[in-house]
Image (tube, rainbow, N blue to C red):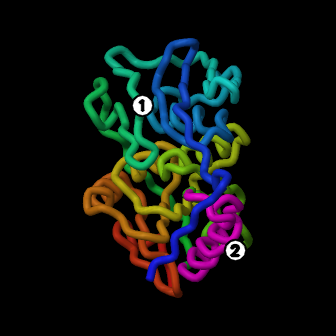
Amino acid sequence: MAVIEYRASAPRTTAERPIRIFLNDAPVAVSQGSPYDLAELAVGYLLSEGLIADRERFVEVTADPEEAAVYVASGERAADGYVPLHRVTSAGCARSALLSGGGDVPAPARLETNARFDADALLAQMDELCERSPRRNTGECVHGCGLGDGRAGGLLLVREDIGRHNAMDKLIGQAWLDRVGMGDKALFITGRISCEMALKAHRAGCPVLVSRKSATDEAARRAEELGVTLVSHCRDGRLRVLSCPDRVTG
């Protein structure tokens, strides 16, 4: 028989807010997500959309937690024809304006790298991500994202959000702000991988994207085109390499 709990006070829940992102005071998107690490979220989102790329032209990012708004100032601006996402994007299924015909976007260059990644190290760093996700480990419904070298040592960065896309944006944004190069690194995510996430990894210049769970067929196809090594089901001593397999060694 099922056990039903009735509580006099509200149980511990995970915070969720609509977060407004601005570039040079122009509204770019409203993203539904966790209201912390907002500066990193906004910068990572703009990087993923291709709206900013030059670290030397970046001016500042200012977050207003009370208003759940983030303002990014940069010498770069949205290209002509870019259609901003003024609607709220779902935390679980974010939608990229670049992938939805938001403007004239040239075919992305394929990632090339000589870096190699050890399968045992990928498994160990995925386990570490699960251990180092504080909100996830206290029962909150969040996804964790980590950055590691896939060779030795621990993860360099860990970020969390209720949305997989947001967690990745936060981590990519933090790495960019800290000037951490991603050309020889691996991104780790606790949730499944969609094609938008493969594009985010490519935009960040990260050659390997690893999930504890599954990946869509479109993600695998797009990752192969982009030169991103996609790894799924990275747990329990096993992993599946779905694209660009030469980078993962036994």
* Residues at circles 1 and 2 in contact by the CB criterion of under 8 Å: no
Residue 113 in percent (x, y) is at 50, 58
Element under disc 1: strand
Quadrant of the rendered image containing residue 219? bottom left
Q: Is residue 32 left or right of residue 82?
A: right
Tell me how far mark 1 sits from mark 2, CA to CA. Answer: 39 Å
Quick one: 80 or 212, which is closer to the camera?
Answer: 212
Mark before the other along the chain sequence, 1 or 2: 1
Q: Secondary structure at mark 2?
A: loop
In the rendered view, tell whether residue 144 sits above or below residue 234: above
Magenta residues span 119-141
Question: Split into 4 quadrants, where in the image is the N terminus?
Answer: bottom left
Near mark 2 (Cα within 10 A), the count class, few <14, some 14-19 or many ≥20, is some
- Whether residue 140 appears in magenta in the rendering, the answer is yes
Residue in view at x 47 percent, y 62 percent: 191
**Above/below status of 49 relative to 72:** below
Amino acid type at image mark 1: Val
Query: Which residue is the site of mark 1?
Result: 88
Q: Which residue is mark 2?
A: 152
Q: Is residue 102 left or right of residue 57?
A: left
Q: Which quadrant holds residue 151?
A: bottom right
**Where's residue 161, x and y in %?**
58, 50
User: Relative to residue 166, is residue 30 depicted above or below?
Assistant: above
Q: Sort mark 1 into few (<14), some (14-19) or many (20+) by Cα contacts within 10 Å.
A: some
**Residue type at numbered disc 2:** Ala
Q: Give percent across and percent down for residue 127.
A: 62, 75
Residue at (52% x, 70% y) in the render:
4
Q: For the point 40% across and 47% down, which residue is it? A: 199
Q: State the residue at coordinates (35%, 57%).
A: 223
